[in-house]
Image (cartoon, rainbow, N blue to C red):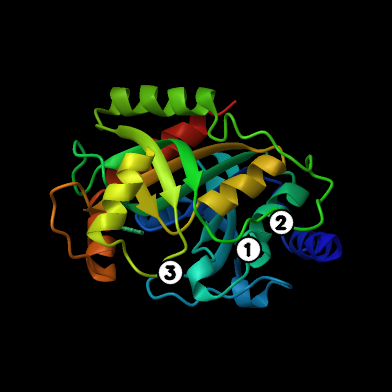
């Protein structure tokens, strides 16, 4: 595993002169942001040694190196989901490589179903914390030397970064929600009983990604910031029917303000 991580990092470093310290996972809704990155080098996942290949509809598979707000960044256009059949080591392999490349700030986005009754479709939710309900843990097995065997998770999402995002959202007049993201494997969307149960567990939104990535990023000492776009609702009294198409449409509707927020966020990172 370590040898593969190093090999992939070396392969990339031989092909790009950029040495970013910021990485962004462009989930649903951040397609617009990709357009604002002035790309210097782009690599198809299928060409990168040891990288899994993304298969899900509507997700591209490219690793971008470029500049956003004048800062060097690395961005994943499309991610690896557990429901696609990858194991957790594959799902989180890119974060391992990021650490090896010197990334210290990890920004992640996703589409999620909202359970909080104050949420609406199209809301932007800053992720304050998460609940891990994936059936496999990304750190299971031999511990890699990037972090301790039993990593602390009391501040999985960096408080300073969260405050920065709140400040920027207020300045830009973009309303944002805040909440707990619960990660499940999918690929089924939740039954009404499951949405109710997750809300009662303490989660505000549910989705099929992000949690494993953040766990590995934290284990590697990166500070993490996450955003969910609420693409559908599953509350106590809401009868929901949800499709992948609806999720993508709702995510696209907030692409512009979200891209503005993240661009300014990156500009102001210390
Ligand atoms: N549940 C799980 N994952 C999701 C949802 C949802 O309601 N919406 C978008 N991704």
Q: Nearer the viewer, mark 2 or mark 3?
A: 2
Q: Earlier in the sequence, mark 3 or mark 1?
A: 3
Q: From the viewer's perspective, is residue 124 above or below residue 52?
A: above
Q: What residue is rendered at 48% in x and 57% in y? A: 209
Displayed-image quarter of ligand 1: bottom left
Secondary structure found at label 2: loop
Image location of residue 185, percent across then percent down: 47, 63
Tell me if 217 is positioned left or right of 109 in this view: right
Q: Which residue is mark 2?
A: 140
Q: In this rendered view, identify the residue nearer to me: 118 or 220.
A: 118
Q: Nearer the viewer, mark 2 or mark 1?
A: 2
Image location of residue 247, percent across then percent down: 27, 61
Tell me if 155 is positioned left or right of 110 in this view: right
Q: Which residue is mark 1?
A: 88
Q: In this rendered view, identify the residue nearer to me: 185 or 104.
A: 185
Q: Which mark is residue 225?
A: none
Is ligand 1 closer than 8 angstroms to the Cβ of mark 1? Answer: no
Tell me if 142 is positioned left or right of 201 in this view: right
Image location of residue 147, percent across then percent down: 78, 41
Q: Which mark is residue 59?
A: 3
Q: From the viewer's perspective, is residue 139 above or below residue 154?
A: below
Is ligand 1 closer than 8 angstroms to the Cβ of mark 3? Answer: no
Contact? badges 2 and 1 (CB < 8 Å): yes
Cα–Cα span, label 2 and label 3: 27 Å
Question: Within 10 Å of the Cα at label 2, are there few (<14), some (14-19), or many (20+) other Cα atoms?
Answer: few
């Amino acid at each position: 595993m370590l040898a593969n991580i190093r090999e992939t990092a070396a392969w990339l470093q031989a092909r790009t002169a950029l040495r970013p310290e910021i990485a962004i996972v462009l989930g649903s809704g951040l397609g617009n942001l990709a357009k604002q990155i002035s790309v210097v080098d782009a690599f198809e996942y299928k060409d990168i040694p040891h990288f899994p290949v993304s298969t899900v509809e509507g997700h591209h598979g490219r690793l971008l190196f470029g500049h956003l707000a004048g800062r060097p960044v690395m961005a994943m256009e499309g991610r690896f989901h557990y429901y696609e059949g990858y194991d957790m080591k594959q799902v989180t392999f890119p974060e391992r490589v990021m650490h090896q490349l010197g990334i210290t700030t990890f920004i992640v986005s996703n589409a999620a179903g909202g359970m909080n009754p104050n949420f609406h479709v199209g809301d932007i939710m800053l992720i304050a914390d998460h609940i891990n309900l994936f059936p496999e843990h990304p750190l299971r097995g031999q511990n890699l030397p990037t972090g301790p065997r039993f990593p602390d998770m009391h501040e999985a999402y960096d408080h300073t970064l969260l405050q920065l995002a709140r400040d920027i959202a207020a300045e830009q007049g973009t309303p944002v929600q805040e909440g707990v993201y619960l990660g499940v494997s999918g690929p089924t969307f939740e039954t009404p009983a499951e949405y109710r149960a997750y809300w009662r567990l303490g989660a505000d939104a549910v989705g099929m990604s992000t949690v494993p990535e953040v766990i590995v990023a934290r284990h590697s000492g990166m500070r993490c910031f996450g955003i969910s776009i609420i693409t559908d609702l599953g509350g106590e009294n809401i009868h929901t029917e949800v499709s992948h198409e609806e999720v993508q449409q709702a995510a696209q509707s907030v692409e512009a303000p979200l891209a503005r927020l993240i661009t300014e966020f990156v500009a102001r990172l210390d």
